[in-house]
Image (cartoon, rainbow, N blue to C red):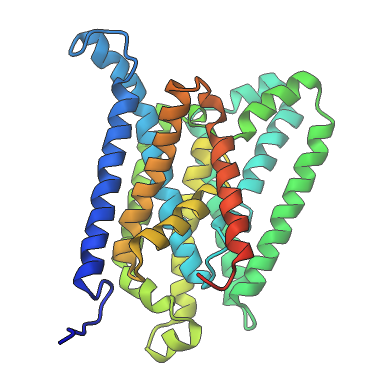
Amino acid sequence: MTQRASGPLPTARSRRRYRIVLTTLLVLAIGFGLGLLAWDNPMPVGSDGFWRIAQLRATMVVVMLVVAFCQALATVSFQTATNNRIVTPSIMGFEALYVAVQTAAVYFLGVAGAGLLKGLPQFVLMVVLMVGLSCALYGWLLSGRYGNIQIMLLIGIIIGGGLASVASFMRRLLSPSEFDVLTARMFGSMANAEASYLPVAIPLCLAAGGALWWQAKRLNVVALGRETSTNLGLNHRREIMRVLFLISILMAVSTALVGPMTFLGFLVATLAYQFADTYDHHHLFPVAVLIGFVVLAGSYFVLKNVFYAEGVVSIIIEMVGGSVFLFVILRKGRL
């Protein structure tokens, strides 16, 4: 007799499959993390020099973990809030604002002046600007009588396009040397992050991520849609605004830390849905975070130690993520 059950992983086969996926991702994450710390270390294993070099590399590994955590939780939660699996939080103009601020700094202050706008004050300023803009946008668009998610997304796209156009205009007026300096800041790279950012970035990530984890069951209800969740007794608008505020913190931290990573979150969330094969966010979040870290750490490890081309990692991730995005668009309706 077939045993019937309900829940996020209803059968013994699905539970076993989930445990295998989680264990495999955990082993890969630990392997790539240790590989980045210890591989090609010129000092004898266990010596003071070995540990000193490993400690220097540890900052980059921690930055990857923070970026994977932010992008994974933010994208999965954003797709749940918008009830759409082909959009990412980048559509709200976070990265366009980052590019516009960086371009404006070089345009108005020059290379020397923009060089002064670095370090922890610049990181905190970027986070405050991005969270402030997103909160103003969400509060204005969702608290009105006719406010809805579709209008919010449309205005977010328009604002992002406008900021990108302004930044493009300023870039055309830069000198070649200023353009080179700006271009180096525009690509998402772990080299953009500094260890001094982490004491601010990590608590913000843990607070926002912990809040999303705490209301994961509410996200399961939100995923059913506005009408269904309202009929089940949930204040849908208030829940959406709370989730979007937490998403804005995660995206602001990730973008201010390493720069634009447009398709990383989409790639991670899409793979997490396929591997976890469940609606429950308590099960989706760990798989998404581990996939994000494996993608980042694995790409850096292979390109750095095999092809000696670590600088192009973000470009390749964006290219693969963009290709997956087009593939999903072409088979829309099957997710």
Q: Residue at x 81, y 27 (%)?
A: 174
- Coordinates of residue 9 in the picture (x, y in percent): 26, 71
Q: Residue at x 32, y 70 (%)?
A: 280
Q: Residue at x 50, y 25 (%)?
A: 310
Camera sees residue 200: no
- Coordinates of residue 192 in the picture (x, y in percent): 52, 29
Q: Residue furthest left?
A: 1
Is 216 left, or right, of 16 in this rendering? right
Q: Residue 332, located in which quarter of the rendered image? A: bottom right
Q: Nearer the viewer, residue 57 or 12?
A: 12
Camera sees residue 119: yes
Q: Residue at x 79, y 21 (%)?
A: 176
Q: Residue furthest front?
A: 1
- Coordinates of residue 107 in the picture (x, y in percent): 76, 30
Q: Quadrant of the N terminus?
A: bottom left
Q: Residue 209, located in which quarter of the rendered image? A: bottom left
Is 70 left, or right, of 86 in this rendering? left
- Coordinates of residue 79 in the picture (x, y in percent): 50, 66
Q: Nearer the viewer, residue 36 or 306?
A: 306
Image mark count: 0
* Above or below: residue 154 compared with residue 238: above
